[in-house]
Amino acid sequence: MTHFKIATLFISSFFILQTSFTQSNSSGVIIYKSTLTASIRAGGGSASQQVNLMMELAVFGKNYKITATALPSPSSTIQFGDMKLYKYYDAATNATYSITPFRNEQYAVSNPITVTDIKETGKTKELLGYLSNEFICSYNGVPAKGWYTKQLPATISAEGNLGLAGMVMSLESERVKMEVEKIDWNVSVKEADTKLPTGIKKMTRQEFETMRKN
């Protein structure tokens, strides 16, 4: 599998995050750890592989930049070394973009996620010291469940805007498992670091795939 296909696997499975803050100048850093399960084709067949990621989310106001770093995955035959991937949430267009390389160029590719049928179960527990509520939903047609808290100054979700009045602390489906490991609102984040690079071309996932096939 080429590095481009590996990057495409990450990007298509990657967490899309939406943010909304009580103050326009809120800033901080959130660390997530996640495991992605994907079917990899090899030798005329396919097999499930797990990929571990650490994601650092740098937030300023309503924008953020997320840096994903591959972690060692002993159970996987695919190792990604020090590969890093980047995403940006742009509040002005209400879209999340993956920085995607192709033919020595960089593109900002939007990746919509479908999340429906959100319901709270009524269960609560503490996560990292924050009282959290359990919810269930459908993520791209796959049942998922998670926990979110109203005790943080942001609404951040692991897989798009889930419509919850708080920050998602964990989310799990048969394909994705993620949880927050660290939250620090005392870290200073520069606004410029959370914005898309100047001059980069934006396109939808469908537009990018059409260009790649031509």
Image (cartoon, helix red, strand yellow):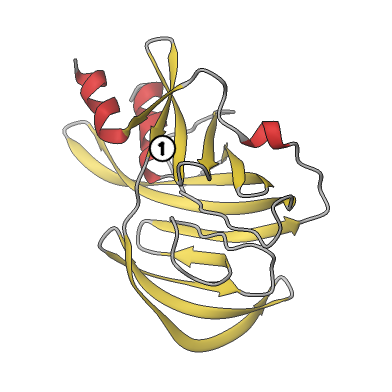
Q: Where in the figure is residue 191, as x and y percent of width and height?
A: 70, 37
> Which three-letter amino acid code belongs to the residue tagged 1?
Ile
Q: In front here: 26 or 107?
A: 26
Q: Residue at x 53, y 73 (%)?
A: 147
As drawn, is 138 to the left or to the right of 24?
left
As drawn, is 112 to the left or to the right of 80?
left
State whether residue 174 is above or below residue 194: below
Q: Residue furthest bottom?
A: 122
* Res. 6 in view: yes
Q: Residue at x 29, y 58 (%)?
A: 140
Secondary structure beneath disc 1? helix
Q: Where in the figure is residue 46, as x and y percent of width and height?
A: 22, 41
* Res. 77 in view: no
Badge 1 density bin: few <14, some 14–19, many ≥20, Cα 10 Å: many
Q: Residue at x 66, y 51 (%)?
A: 31
Question: Can you tell which quarter of the image residue 202 is in?
Answer: top left
Q: Where in the figure is residue 60, as x and y percent of width and height?
A: 69, 45
Quarter the C terminus occupies: top left
Read off the residue under disc 1: 11
